[in-house]
Each structure stands twice: as C-alpha cells, then as structure tokens.
Image: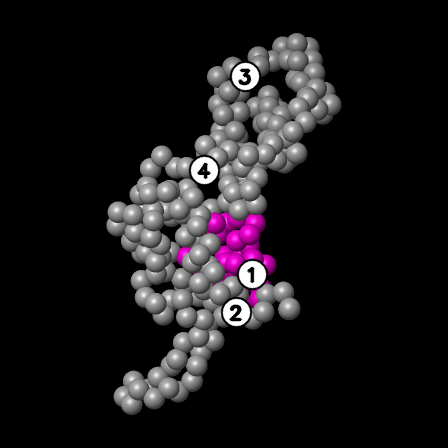
Amino acid sequence: HFFVYLQYHLNVLDTTNMMRRSSSIPSSPSPVRCVALLLLCTISSSLGFTPPSPQLLGSISSNLSTKSTKLYNIYDDWSTDLLSTASSDYTYEDLILPFCDEEAVEECLEELMDSDYGKTMFGRHDMAANVGITGTLELISLEGPEATLSLIGKFWHRRETVLGKAAMYLNARMPEITSITVASAEDLNDFEEVTDEFTGEVLYVEDKRSPDFNGD
C-alpha cells in the first residue's frame, strides 16, 4: 500500500507539471520527484518489500492521465486564438469533432459553460450566481444541420450574445451545424411583458436580466 501511495503522489506531481500552461520550455524531472524515486528504491531494497507490478503502476498513471486531459478547457484557447501556439494544450486538429450528434452538442455546451469565460456568464458558477445570474443553456433538439437551444434563467449578457457565443463555438467544433436557433423568439428577449390572461392588458414588464455584473 505504501508503494501505491508514493507512486500516486509521484503521478500527482506529474499532473501538476502538466497543468503549467507555459509548456514552451522543455520540462525536466523535479527535485521532489527525484528524491521520491530514490526513497522508493531505497526502502524497497533495504526492507525487502516487493515493489508493485509495472501493470499496477501503469494503471494508476493511466487513470491520472485520463483525468488530467479534462483539466483544461478548449473553449478558452479557441476563443483567444491560442490553438496554434505553444501556450495551448490543444491544436486546431483537436477542435473539429469527428461526429455530430446530440451528445457532442451537449458536450460542447458544457465546455462553453464550464470555461473561464463561462464563469462570468452562467449561473452554475459562484462568481456569477453571487450577482443574481441564473442562466444556463440546454439543447432542445438536433435535426440534421439545425440545433435548437433554450436559454433558461437570467443573464447579465444580452441573450442574443449568449446564443451567439454558443452558435459560433458549435459551428467551430462541428462545421456540419449551420443553423443554431431558439425554440421561441421570446427566448431572446431581455424583457418580458406580463399580461392579464383575460383582457390581454400589459400588467408590467419583467426584466429578464441579472443585476449588473461588474458595476459599470
């Protein structure tokens, strides 16, 4: 168990190194890792422990590597035009998905909403929720090249802007999608008229926007 524990932390060190965005400089083994490896070999030889099999250590490393692939968000790199630079963990080849189905669309919407940019736009994040933003995006349907989305809740950004961000990203990742719309035109209205159900008279206008995000 000790060896598994130590190897786990060695892999955590590797994962941490991978998280450093400035990857243009070749990485070298850290002093901490070297000392840990030396400790592992020393204890193994002096106490007679049998080191864990390469298969076990490979499994641990593989699991950590798999998890680390989703530490970064391709949306942020795409939106800031970093995909062709050494600063990005992704390339333009990674951008185009080889398939276009509902699952892929939902995955791309998640990437947008979970991106650093999305933290200012969607209510799933504390920073946005703290100022009253509750907005989220949902896929309603995908029929051929046409995707229909729903904008739910309150946004600080204009609702047309939110849809536009989603549309550009979906088209960039899946060029087959050429039309991104909403189920109802009212989905894009930042204000909604509340009317009397019997007379049709406008009772009041509801503001569907959240409070000002940055106070400007």
Cα distance between the residues tagged 1 and 3 = 46 Å
Q: Tag on residue 210?
A: 2
Q: How is the image coloured?
A: one colour
Secondary element type, mark 1: helix
Secondary element type, mark 3: loop
Q: Nearer the viewer, residue 105 or 7?
A: 105
**Which residue carries the number 4 mark?**
95
Residue 173 image-quadrant placement: top left
Residue 202 visible in image: yes
Looking at the rendered structure, the kind of residue marked 1 is Ala
**In the image, is residue 124 above or below residue 190?**
above
Looking at the rendered structure, the kind of residue marked 4 is Leu
- The answer to whether residue 213 is left or right of residue 31 is left
| Disc 4 packing (10 Å; few <14; some 14–19; many ≥20) | some
Highlighted range, magenta: 112-137
Cα distance between the residues tagged 4 and 3 = 38 Å
Residue 41 position within the rendered picture, expressed as x and y whole percent measured from the top left: 66, 13
**Which residue carries the number 1 mark?**
128
Cα distance between the residues tagged 2 and 1 = 9 Å
Q: Does the magenta run of residues contain 101?
A: no
| Disc 1 packing (10 Å; few <14; some 14–19; many ≥20) | many
Q: Nearer the viewer, mark 2 or mark 3?
A: 2
